[in-house]
Amino acid sequence: MFKSGNGHLPIVCGIKTIRRAIQQQSSALLFYQNRQLELYASKEAKRLTLRQLVYFGRHMNEERLITSANYVRTELPIRIAHRLRDLQALPYVVVTQEGVAKVYELYWSAFEKLRNYPKVTSLAENDRFCQFVGTLLNEHAPVIPNLSLGLSLSSPHLPPDKLDSFMRRMLISRISRRVLAEHHIALSDTFSGRGRETNGEPHVGIIFTGLNVKRSVERCSRLLKESPLWIMSSSGPSDSSQLPDVEVNGHSSTTFAYIREHLEYIIFELLKNSMLATYSKHQNESSTPSIQVTIVAGEHDVGIRISDQGSGLPFHDRLSKASDLFSFSHVRNATRLEDSRLGALRTASENGLRATVDEQVGNWHKAHAQDPIAAETTSSELLHPRIGIGLPMSNIYATYFGGTLDLVSLDGWGTDVYLRLPKLGTNLEGIEV
Ligand code: COI
């Protein structure tokens, strides 16, 4: 026993004894914490469907909101524990790479805080719980660039399949935790009358129940045309009026229940690539061919095809398949170890990433209004155009509820991207949560 009755170290002992006692105390603590981790990691995640999230949130009352809070409180540490075990299983050389330790620390800290968070029993306690979870969401903003940096640097030490499946589990699981947390916060906001501005579009928590696909495509296209990304990009136009137009055809009145942020993240990234490629190919011609977006409402899913005439996928000749662009391994995607990309990742690791298109573009405009010069110099961080995670993240968002994302390059002509998202909301979250 090295603790006195009141929990402090005994006063009458030599310096060596104290040191030994502290060492014992910290290894005992570590042992205890690891036991807790084992306990949580051995539990299965309670995976949900989009439909369950909507159904539960639709008829909200105090009791249901508190049930939702306690589900989030008990579910998040289980999901984090799974990923902490994954991180512990990585070879030592990977754990020592820049960025990886930071993610591990953030996850340990969140795991401990959530595990010890007391049961929520009232609306006032739920308000405090939402604030606590909101702080965690902000603290975790640098996770993706840190992880991408660490794993890109680890690429020479991990076989590509192992690296990519680890990254996929980390990213899917992160999306899942953020969905649970953000959905609960949004439900609580609506219940207490602090609802968000949604331009009159019906929603339950973060799920838009009649999400209009054409409207989202047009919003992303408009935001891209207004965005300062082009000023920053050395290969982009000096004036966004030179960018190609986006034409929407097909079943253009399609609506379905989906998380708007996820759909728009994907569309924004895909249109951004298409616009830049099309501009680069046709900049010296009298006109720029438009980008065609075709929307199709199928029986089980919503299909979206984005066709451009931007000459095909970059580096396609060096990839064995188009989906290698989703890979974090330099074996499959050589750009992962390029100095410019690693440098941009380091900057983003410091500052965190803005996840939504509104955050990406809106924050820049806000910053620009306050301090135009500072905004110019920080916009590369806000818009992260060069860190190479837009496509892999779009693929993760697409597949989280069982959708697909495929790229077909007609080298020398253009690229067709096919996005399919399930429209019935009955698929469970990815197995990796
Ligand atoms: C993450 O963003 O990585 C999280 O795990 C967020 C969660 C702790 C609320």
Image (cartoon, rainbow, N blue to C red):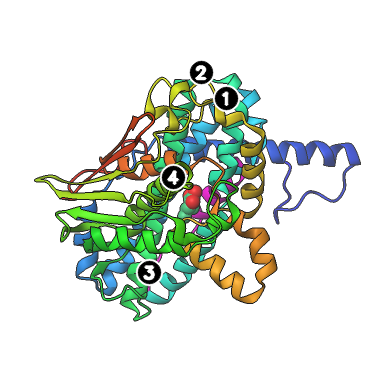
Q: Which mark is residue 121?
A: 3
Q: Specify the amino acid type for callout 3.
A: Thr
Give the residue number, with chain letter if any, for mark 4: 282
Residue found at x 63% / y 44%: 344
Name the disc covering residue 155, or none. Answer: 1
Magenta residues, dominant SS class = helix
Which quarter of the image is occupied by the N terminus? top right
Q: Is residue 112 magenta?
A: yes
Front-lying residue, 27 or 409 = 409
Within the image, what quadrant is residue 209 found in? Answer: bottom left
Q: Percent x, y for residue 12? A: 87, 48
Looking at marks 3 and 2 on the same chain, the residue that comes earlier in the sequence is marked by: 3
Q: Earlier in the sequence, mark 3 or mark 4?
A: 3
- Does residue 20 appear left or right of residue 228 in this picture? right
Earlier in the chain: of badge 1 and badge 4, it is 1
Amino acid type, callout 2: Pro
Q: Which residue is mark 2?
A: 159
Regarding mark 2 in the picture, which secondary structure is present there?
loop
Residue at the location (50% across, 58% down)?
137
The residue that appears at 75% across and 53% down in the rendered structure is 8
The magenta stretch is 104-122
Query: Which is more foreground, mark 3 or mark 2?
Result: 2
Q: What secondary structure is marked by label 1? A: helix
Q: Is residue 358 magenta?
A: no
